[in-house]
Every structure is written in structure tokens, then in C-alpha cells.
Amino acid sequence: MHYGYIGLGNLGGHLAASLLGAGFKVTVHDKDRAAAKRLLALGAAWADTPEALAQACDAVVTCLPSPKVSELVLGQMLKTLRPGTTWIEMSTLGRDEILRLAASAAEKGVRTMELPVTGGVHLAARGQITMLAGGDKDLFDRHRPALEAMGDKIFHMGPLGSAAVIKVITNMLAFIHLVADGEALMLAKRGGLDLGQAWAAIKASSGTSFVHETEGQLILNGSYDIAFTMDLALKDLGFAMNFGREFEVPLDLATLTHQTFVKGKAAYGGDAQSTQIVKLLEDALGTDLRAPGFPARLE
């Protein structure tokens, strides 16, 4: 199976490298050719355009920053994708968006599987990220070896659109946990506790979370470097708000978290790290949340 991979950013570069490491033939493209340097050294082929990549491959994986970019790239690929090939979309899209774009692909005889991921860039680098697939089961089974090369927890959520819903839910929870963790660490700091010990105690308690155990370390280091921006967080929280309205579920905590991230973007900019949302509290109280011994990046 010859895979194409478009979008070689913080996440996509690691996932494409995992495909190469598992022995798959991979052709890559990114608007910045420099992003492909490591992959070309690992044996990937380069395509100058999405059209050229699509023409050469049996399946194309995209990992892109926004629905607008996904639609643009798909339109380019559909000029040359052969009937019977597969588009695997790893970008975070709304359910309606993935269904609409998949319908456009189907008109050209191209089948679609959505495959958003969760767990963080550091797990993608290890080939241990969680993969959430939506689409026909036979398509999932056909590409499962490639999925297993990229991740170690793989869930077929159901028909196309299902993965978009669960991805938004997991991200919504992560952002709620992030804001809550900042408040918890600040209580510990202002209460006179050693923050390193407080972090370890929370990690061993019923109050722990994946966010506390990972992003909490970057807050205590002061780097905040999770490779995920305020703009991306707001995009995902916007999807959650839309689902809340559509499914008639009141999302009180998610709504407050969304409002907090709007303030975070206003204070630090859309390109700021999403973990800097905790800095709103640090700045308001004039109290930082630093502790020695924590990493600047997760490995």
C-alpha cells in the first residue's frame, strides 16, 4: 500500500515517520518543503503539489490546521485521485464538514475515513497516540496495519461522522481539565505548599487527569510548550458548543472554559500555547506556578 501524507507539522511529521518506520511506501507534501527534510532522509518521496501526490498513491492521509485548508487540499487532490482510492482525514473537523467533504469525494469514486487523534504530540512521536476512526468497517480493516503503525490505541467509533463527535468531546474535556488544573495548582501555591510535591500528590490521587500528568508539567516548568495553540483550542471548543446546541445538551463547564480561552487569546494571541490559559490566573494574582525538575517539553 502506497500512502501519501499531506501536512507535516508538529503532529503529521511524526505520524508520517511512523508509517515509514513500519516499512510503508510514503510520498509526502507540505506547503513548507523544509518540514519534509527528516522524512526524506528516512526514505519518503516528495511531491511538489497535492495533485501530484494524489495521482501516485493508493491512499492519501491529510493532517491539516483547519476545515478551510482541508477543503482546499481535497479539492486539489480530487483532480487526480483515482476511483477506488481512500482519503484518510486526520484533521479535526466538525461532523457536518466531514460528511460534506466525503460526499464530494464519493462523487469521484473516492472513499473517506476520518481519523482524528488524541493524546499529544509526544505520544505521536512514540507511535503511541490514540486513533479515533469513523467510516465503513471494511475500509477501517483495510487500513488497520497503517493505523497500528501510527498509534497503539485504535477505536472504530462507527459510521463517518462518529469520530468527529468523540474527538470534540475528548478535546472539550481536556480544556476543562486544563483550566481546572491551573486553579488547583494555584490553590496549592497560595496555600504554601511545595508545588512539586503538590503535583505528585495530585497525580497519585482521585483528582488526577491525563492533562495534569502531562501539561501540568509544562506549566510548572514555565515553557507551556505543548505544540497546540489558543486558536486550535477555540476551534475545538466552538465545535463542542455547536454540538451542545444541536443535541440540546447544556454545556455549562464547556461554556465557561470557552469564555476563558477567548480571554486567553485576547491576552496572549491566537498563536500562544493553549497551556498559557493558566497564565491568565498567574498574571491576575501576580503569582507564578514554577517548580524545579519539570521538563520544557514532553518526550
Image (tube, grey):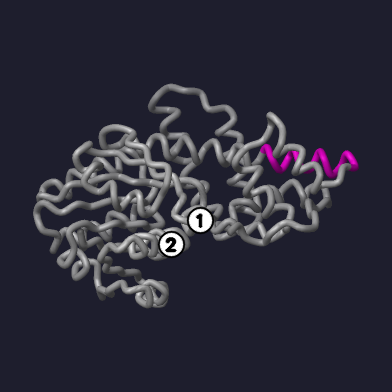
Q: Is residue 44 above or below residue 153?
A: below
Tell me the residue at 16%/67% (across/down). 56
- Kindly identify which residue carries mark 1: 121
Determine the residue positioned at 41% across, 49% down: 151
Magenta residues (range): 180-192
Amino acid marked by disc 2: His
Height in image: 87 above or below 13? above
User: Mainly helix, strand or loop, the magenta region?
Assistant: helix
**Marker disc for residue 14:** 2
Residue 83: x %, y % from top left: 9, 54
Corner quadrant of residue 7: bottom left
Give the vertical position of 34 relative to 244 (above or below). below
- Check if mark 2's residue and mark 1's residue have beta carbons within 8 Å: yes
For marks 2 and 1, give the CA distance: 8 Å
Q: Position of residue 269 (x, y in %)?
A: 59, 58
Does 275 sit left or right of 109 as displayed? right
Judge the density around disc 1: few (<14), some (14-19), many (≥20) Cα neighbours within 10 Å. many
Q: Nearer the viewer, residue 195 or 276?
A: 195
Q: For residue 186: magenta?
A: yes
Q: Quadrant of residue 78?
A: bottom left
Q: Quadrant of the N terminus?
A: bottom left
